[in-house]
Image (cartoon, rainbow, N blue to C red):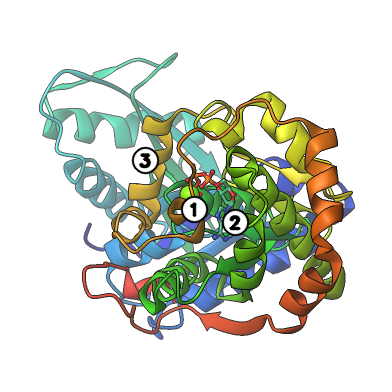
Amino acid sequence: MQNIDRLILRLGEMTLKGKNRSRFEKTISEHVRAVLRPYPKAHVRREYGRMYVETGGESVEALIQVLKNVFGIMDIIPVKQTLPQLDDIIAAAVELIGEQQIEQLTTFKVSVKRVWKEFPHSSQDMNHLVGSPVLRAYPLLKVDVRQPEIELRVEIRDGAAYIYSELIPAVGGFPRGSNGKAMLLLSGGIDSPVAGWQSMRRGLEVECIHFHSYPFTSERAKEKVVDLTRVLAGYAGVVKLHVVPFTEIQTAFTTTGQDNLMITLMRRAMLRIATKIAEQQKGLALITGESLGQVASQTLSSMNAIERATELPILRPLVMTGKDEIIQIAKEIGTYNLSILPYEDCCTLFIPKSPTTNPNLRIIEKVESFLELEPMIERAVEQTELMIIEAGSPLQLASATINEDWF
Ligand code: ATP
Ligand code: MG
């Protein structure tokens, strides 16, 4: 993509409504400025109620790559800028269409908007004046004014004309952190990082909580989670990670003689601890990577018994999403390669031979009261380590890949 002078950033419809609009726009423009920091010649501008990035000679591909990941941006339109003169506009239009490399019969239309009324040709005339030379240059183009595959738009203003046609889809969603804060239970698996990213995309500020059972689980398992958090931070700037020592509680559960309830008990303890950390950090919900029916602890009956351990709402972005789709997203957001590294998670280690798919709440509550969990839970919360994970710094585990350009 050569000679693109600016990128128009189109924001989601939702972000444009009501009195939140200016707050949302401000958040998005701050986010855009943050991702553009490695590109000092590029500039963000807000003009005529839209948001632009002046490329300033930076690589357009690189800019699009980072801007695509800014929450709240629906699509990106690369724009050529010329003087508001017929010859210049035609030349730019021909060049712009040339970049789309048309190899088969493609329908096409020109739409001209004349904001600068002194411009000597009417919009009607301009459609022909620009359309004809473009059609001559590209014989595979055919005019269709109703549903064209390519719509070449020309906007003529006082001092400049803008020519564009391509719409590059971006991540969309709500602006970063605009919908409040929730705590993500982040394991080293494939699902929870995806659930975290999806929550961030819907405007949630996400803080991660990881349960670690050293020495049952290795330092590497923890590093893996730090790295996963860092990938998430690539989308948000900074993400907090709370690492909870879970060894004492987990060991206590092994003494109950209720192996098949192990996972249910562990999950409930996790939720209790996460709820306390949420209260401290003013998080209003918990997020998990659970997906209905995926494993024994994710049947409706298990979820039911597990979630009674907290009064906070549990958000499960992936609850109805199949594994293939989750894996696909994990690959796209850059967490997959890390998630499939072998280091054991605390739950995988303690998985019993036949975990129940239909836990009995009364038995569970009895076991819990017998164990006197509360002091152990308090201790775990007290000894929780807080890490502030920033985007950009290198990952610790060698086989991982991350787009260092994000921030
Ligand atoms: P994931 O791929 O996210 O690990 P999973 O399909 O392996 O999910 P489980 O291991 O049953 O599912 O865990 C269900 C959810 O519980 C996870 O998605 C995560 O939100 C939470 N969870 C599990 N283990 C931990 C842990 N060690 N620390 C924090 N959260 C955890
Ligand atoms: Mg798991």
Q: Nearer the viewer, mark 2 or mark 3?
A: 2
Q: What element carries label 3?
A: helix
Which amino acid does the dot numbered 1 rest on? Phe
Image location (x, y in percent) of residue 87? 27, 51
Image location (x, y in percent) of residue 355? 55, 35
Q: In this view, does 194 lie to the left or right of 130?
A: right
Q: Is residue 139 left or right of residue 9?
A: left
Q: Is residue 298 above or below residue 49?
A: above
State the mark number for residue 224.
Answer: none
Please indicate, yes or no, whether residue 110 appears anywhere in the rendered image.
yes
Residue behind mark 3: 327
Circles 2 and 1 in contact, beta carbons < 8 Å:
yes
Which amino acid does the dot numbered 3 rest on? Ile
Residue occupying image coordinates x 22% and y 34%? 134
Residue behind mark 2: 254
Residue occupying image coordinates x 43% and y 69%? 217
Residue behind mark 1: 350
